[in-house]
Image (spheres, rainbow, N blue to C red):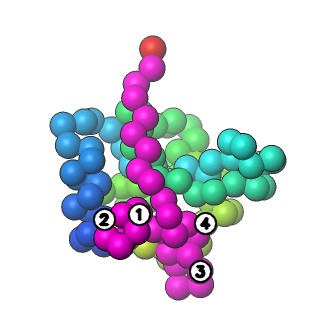
Amino acid sequence: MQIDITAAAIEKINERTADRKGFLKLKYDTDGCGCAVNGVIALWFVPAIDQDDDLAIETNDRPVYVEKAKTVFLDDDMKIDFSQTANCFQLKSPQQILNGRMSLMIKEKTD
């Protein structure tokens, strides 16, 4: 699996995560979607990763983590972009747009 992050997306990620420590993660979010095969891919910034379940994908900027079991919902070659017009992130592949209106969710550390 390969993920490229565009310059526009890198700039927005850095702007929104400034002074925070954490990891970028593509999360297959099923909350409110009915069942495990109905979901949407979301971009999260998390304070920690699950060493046993999260797989690191090297990119042109920083590793992006994905849950091993959820890789079936992703394509082999993807790009994280930022649309100035829509003011949101986008996850694309040569075959499809996986999420054309993706927010960056900042997850705070919980005790």
Q: Which residue is mark 2?
A: 9
Farthest residue, direction right:
35
Residue 97: assigned label = none
Question: Is 81 rendered above or below residue 55?
Answer: below
Name the residue type under label 4: Leu
Q: Is residue 76 left or right of residue 10?
A: right
Q: Which residues are magenta?
A: 83-110
Q: How far across and how far down the image is residue 78, in percent? A: 48, 73
Name the secondary structure under disc 2: helix
* Residue 60 seen in the figure: no
Give the alpha-carbon distance from disc 3 to disc 4, as whole Å.
10 Å
Residue of label 4: 74
What SS does tag 1 mark?
Answer: strand
Residue 38 image position (x, y, % from top left): 76, 55
Sequence-wise, the earlier of marks 2 and 4 is 2
Residue at image point 58% right, 57% down: 41
